[in-house]
């Protein structure tokens, strides 16, 4: 069920992020407030038009059209260093979309993937020449953001089917399961799958 107040959101968010995780430090009150704005944006956008997920390089036109959290490669909340993109902000946005029961469109076409792989994209740690759903094979394997998003959708009541232009559209098939998603469960269940993949 959607978080109706910041107090409820903050309690769950801080409980889920009381320790470090991947590249994120322990979350604080200010980050909970920023994450809540991401969550509300995902909730509203999901209900209005659905969310688009995938590599930012593939989403530029859709982001401009749908006014997602990203704006020209930045974020809609703030451009200060402490409020730049973080994994838990992304999770908040996705969780808002899940609670909206709106559709998610994974932009994943061969044309876009091939262009991205050919570019090498050496700015991405360990991902040069990899597709957005390829697994990272470093010393400490972890899920890429797109993989986390797709796993969360499958965990919390969504099912995917081919869409137009090589995309995959995930629709809510189990509203009760979507409503049961919390930050604590989201981090725990995605983390458990991530751990199994790394074993």
Image (tube, rainbow, N blue to C red):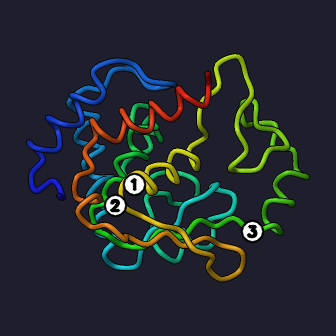
Q: Which label was assigned to residue 106? A: none
**Is 21 in front, or is 174?**
174
Residue 56 relative to residue 109: left or right: left
* Distance in Å between CA atoms under marks 1 and 3: 21 Å
Vertical placement of residue 160 versus 73, above or below: below
Q: Earlier in the sequence, mark 3 or mark 2?
A: 2
Contact between labelled residues 2 and 3, with CB atoms less than 8 Å apart: no
Which image quadrant: the N terminus? bottom left
Estimate how packed mark 3 is, as few (under 14), some (14 to 19) or many (20 or more) residues with alpha carbons within 10 Å: some
| Residue designated by label 2 | 98
Image quadrant holding the C terminus, namely top right
Identify the residue under disc 1.
94
Q: Are marks 1 and 2 in contact (CB under 8 Å)?
A: yes
Q: Position of residue 114 (x, y in %)?
A: 86, 60
Q: Nearer the viewer, mark 1 or mark 2?
A: 2
Instruction: Identify the element where label 3 is drawn.
Output: loop
The residue most toward the bottom is: 164
In this view, 118 is above or below 145: below
> Which residue is disc 3 drawn over?
109
**Is 176 situated left or right of 90 in this image?**
left
Q: Where residue 10 sits in the image (x, y, percent)?
A: 17, 38
Question: Which of disc 3 and disc 1 is earlier in sequence?
Answer: 1
């Amino acid at each position: 069920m959607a978080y109706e107040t910041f107090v409820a959101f903050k309690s769950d968010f801080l409980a889920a992020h009381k320790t470090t995780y991947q590249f994120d430090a322990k979350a604080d009150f200010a980050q909970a407030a920023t994450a809540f704005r991401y969550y509300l944006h995902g909730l509203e956008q999901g209900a209005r038009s659905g969310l688009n997920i995938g590599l930012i390089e593939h989403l530029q036109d859709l982001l401009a059209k749908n006014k997602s959290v990203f704006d020209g490669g930045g974020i809609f909340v703030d451009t200060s260093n402490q409020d730049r993109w973080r994994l838990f902000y992304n999770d908040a946005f996705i969780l808002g979309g899940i609670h909206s029961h709106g559709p998610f469109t994974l932009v994943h076409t061969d044309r876009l993937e091939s262009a991205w792989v050919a570019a090498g994209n050496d700015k991405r740690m360990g991902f040069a020449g990899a597709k957005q759903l390829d697994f990272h094979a470093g010393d400490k394997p972890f899920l890429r953001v797109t993989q986390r998003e797709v796993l969360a959708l499958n965990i919390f009541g969504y099912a995917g089917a081919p869409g137009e232009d090589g995309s995959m559209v995930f629709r809510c098939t189990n509203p009760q399961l979507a409503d049961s998603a919390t930050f604590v469960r989201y981090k725990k269940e995605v983390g458990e799958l991530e751990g199994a993949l790394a074993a």
